[in-house]
Image (cartoon, rainbow, N blue to C red):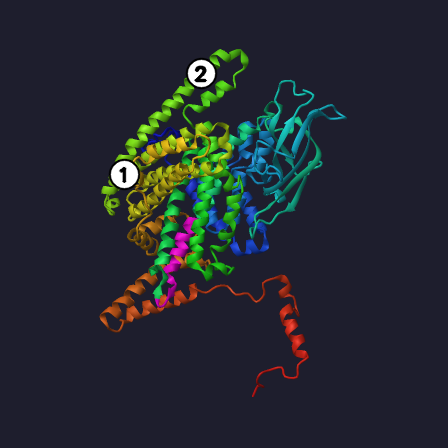
Amino acid sequence: DRDIFGGSPSLQHLIDTYTPALSDEEQSFLDVQVHHLCSILSDHDVATDKDFSREAWDYMRDERFFGMKIPREWGGLGFSTHAVSTILAKLATQCFDANATVAVPNSLGPGELLVRYGTPDQKEYFLPRLADGTLIPCFGLTGPHSGSDATSLIGSDCVVSRHPDTGELGVVASFRKRYITLAPVAGVVGLGLNLRDPEGLLGGEGEEGFTVALLERGHEGLRMGPRHIPLSAAFMNGTVEGDDVWIPMDSILGGQGRCGFGWNMFVECLAEGRGVSLPAGSIGAARSVVAGVGAYSRVRKQFRVPIAEFGGIQEAMAKAGSDGLITIAGGDVMNAIVDNHEAPMVISSVMKQNCTERGRRIVECGMDVAAGSAICRGERNYIGNAYMSLPIAITVEGANIMTRSFQIIGQGLTRCHPHMSDLLRALQRPPSEEKEATAVFVRQFYKIVGHGVSNFFGSVGRGVTSSVSSAARSKTAYKNGDDLLAYHEKQLLRLSNNFALTADLCFTLGGRLKFEELLMGRLADALGAIYLGYATLHHYHRRRGVDGLEALTEHAMLRLETEAQDALYAASENFPGPLGPLASAVMKVGCFPLGGLTRPYSPPGDDLTKEVSRLLTTPSEIRDMFEENIYRAGEGAGPHQMTDLIDALPVCVEADRAASSVRREKREPTAQEADLIARADALRDALIQVDVFEHATAAEAAPGYVRPALQGTEDRFAALERTVFREAA
C-alpha cells in the first residue's frame, strides 16, 4: 500500500517476497479433518435448525478448529494464515455458517491477542482451553452508538477504582455490546472498553483509552446468551451486556501495563479478521459459483440448447469467473503478507471492502444463472444461503460503505504516504522540541511537494506511453504470457502514478478531506483496483501454465484497469474544496494529458467474454483450478448437488457433441451414442429438480393441521348449495 501511494509499486517485489503455500500437515488437515467436518454438515439443516449438531460442535473442538492459530506449545495447531484462509474458504463451499463460526476464534477472538500480549498467567490458563475448545471465544467491540469504531466506544465505559471490600485495584464497567459473533455460546469474551482514570490510580503504569478485558461466562454481572438472527444465518450472534461490573486488574488483557493499549492490539490483529477471514467466504463463494453454476449452465437446457450458449449467461459467468480470480489472487497475496509478519491496515480494509463486494456480485451472477433452482431452499440448493450470508460479511467489521468512503483513504494518507507520517509526528512533539520539530515539518513539507511534482510528470509521461501501447495492442496479444505480464504491469504503473498524484492533491483540502467522502470513495475504488491488479498478475506468474489462464487474467485485468481509470476520472471531474478547480485541472493534465485519448481502458470485448465463459462451463484446466478447494462428497455419501453437477458436466458435454454430430450428419445415433445421450438426459432431469416439502414449518406438521386459507375456503363452501363444478361419475 505504501508503494502504491508512492507511485512506484513493483510486481517483481511481490513475486520475490510473497509466496503463499501450505505445509504437508496443513494440506492433510484440509483433506481429512475439513473434509469430514463438511461431510457431517447439512447446510439446509443448519439453516433450518439455526444451530449445528452436538456431533459437529464436538468435532470442531476435538480437532482444534478453534485453535488453528494458537501455537503448538499451548495446544493449538500453529497453522499459517494461508492455511486458515484456505480452510475457511473450503468450509464456505459447504456451509457458510461453519465458515463464520470457525473464523472468529482464529481472527478476532482473543486467542491471538493473548499470544502476543497476555500475561504469563493469562496465557497459561486461557490458551490451552481456547486451543481444545473448552472455552469458545468471542470479541465484544460493536455497540449501538459507535458500531465497530474502536476510537469512540460510546456506551462502553470503565473507571479505574478499588474494590470497596478488599481494596484491590480494578475497573468498574458498564457496557452494551451487540452483533457479537459466538456470544450466545462463548465461554470467554474479550471486551473492548473505554478506560478512564480520574483519580490517577494507575500511577503511571498503563494509561487511559481503549482497553481489552477478559471475562468468562458466569462473571458476576456479565450477561451473555440472547441471540440475534442475522437474515437467514444460523451462526451464533448476540449481545454482551453488563452494568457496574467489577473487573480485577489481572483480567485486563496484558495486565495493568496494557491499560489504554487496546488500539495498538486492535490494529495489529485486525488485519487477520478483515483482510483474511471475511474475504475467505467470498473465495469459497467464487469457487462454488464457477464449479456448481458453471456446470449447471451446461446441464440445464432451454429451447433444447444449454443455457451456457446464451449471451446473457455468458456475460454473467465471465464476470463471476474474473471476479473470482481477482478475489482468490487478492486473498493469496494478503495471506502471504500476514504470514510475513506484516499488518497492512489499509490493504486489509481494501480486501474486506472490495472482496466481500465482489463476493456479493459473484453470488448474484450465480443466482441469476441458476434462477429457480437457486431460490428454492433445500438440500439441493448450494448457493442460496451464501446469497443471504454475503450481505452480513459486507456489514460486519466496519460496513463497506464506511470502509470505502472514509477509512481506506483516511488511513492511507496518514499511514502509507511516504512522507506524511514523519510530518505528523513532528506536529505531535512537545513544546521543548519546537525548533527541531519545525525543521522536520518544513523538510517533510517540501518532500511532499516534491513528491507531487514528481508524480505529476511521471503521470504525464506514463499516461502518454501507456495509451500508445494500448492503442497499438492486438486484442489477442494476451495469449503470449510474457506480453500479458509486461503490458498490464505497465498499465498498473501508470495508474499508480495517477493515484499517487491524486493523493498528493488531497492535501489541498486540509482537514476538510475527512468530510469529502465521495472523493475518498472514488480513490478507494482506484486503490483497490490497482492492488488487486498486482495481485492478479502475481497469481498469473505463480500459476502460469494452466491452460486458459491467460484469457481469464486478461478479462480480469481489463475490468480492473477500467475501474481504476473511471474512478480517477470521476474524481478529476468532481474534485472538491476551495482549490478544487485548480486541483481538478492539475489532475486532468497529469492523469489524462490528451483527454479522452489518454483514457484507453474499456471493459472486455464480447469475444473474450465468450471465451472465458466457455472455459468456465466446459471441462478445462481453469475449472480444475476453481475446483481445487471445494468440498466434494465421497463415493457412497449419497446425493450432493455440487458434486453431482461437477460429475455430470463431462457426460453432458460429450452427449451434446454426439447429438450435434448426429444432427449434422443426418443419421441415427450408434448404440453407444444413444446410451450416452440417454444417460445425459437422465442426469439433466435429476439435477434440475428442486426440493419440495410436505410441510414448511413445525405447525404444518402437526396432526390435523389445515392451512388457514383452506379453512376459509371450507367455511365459504359450507354456505353454498353447489360445491363442485362437476359431480364425479
From the image, which quarter does the C terminus lie in?
Answer: bottom right
Q: Which residue is mark 2?
A: 440
Q: Compared to 226, does 707 lie above or below?
A: below
Locate residue 519, reporting x and y percent. Answer: 45, 37
Q: How far separated are the C-alphas under marks 1 and 2?
A: 39 Å
The residue that appears at 28% across and 64% down in the rendered structure is 657
Q: Relative to 57, is 715 on the left or the right? A: right
Q: Which residue is mark 1?
A: 467
Say which of 117 and 604 sits in front: 604
Which kind of residue does numbered mark 2 sit on?
A: Val
Locate residue 414, reporting x and y percent. Answer: 47, 27
Q: Quadrant of residue 666?
A: bottom left
Q: In the rendered structure, which segment of residues is drawn in magenta?
A: 285-304
Q: Residues within 10 Å of mark 1 (few under 14, many from 20)?
A: many
- Asked if residue 4 can be seen in this view, the reply is no
Locate residue 90, reporting x and y percent. Answer: 45, 47
Q: Describe the element under mark 1 as helix, strand or loop.
A: helix
* Residue 523 - label: none
- Asked if residue 466 can be seen in this view, the reply is yes
Locate residue 36, reporting x and y percent. Answer: 48, 50
Q: Residue furthest bottom?
A: 729
Q: Compared to 710, does 391 lie above or below?
A: above
Specify whether residue 300 is painted magenta. yes
Specify whether residue 18 is painted magenta. no
The residue that appears at 41% across and 49% down in the rendered structure is 287
Which kind of residue does numbered mark 1 sit on?
A: Ser
Q: Residue furthest right?
A: 165
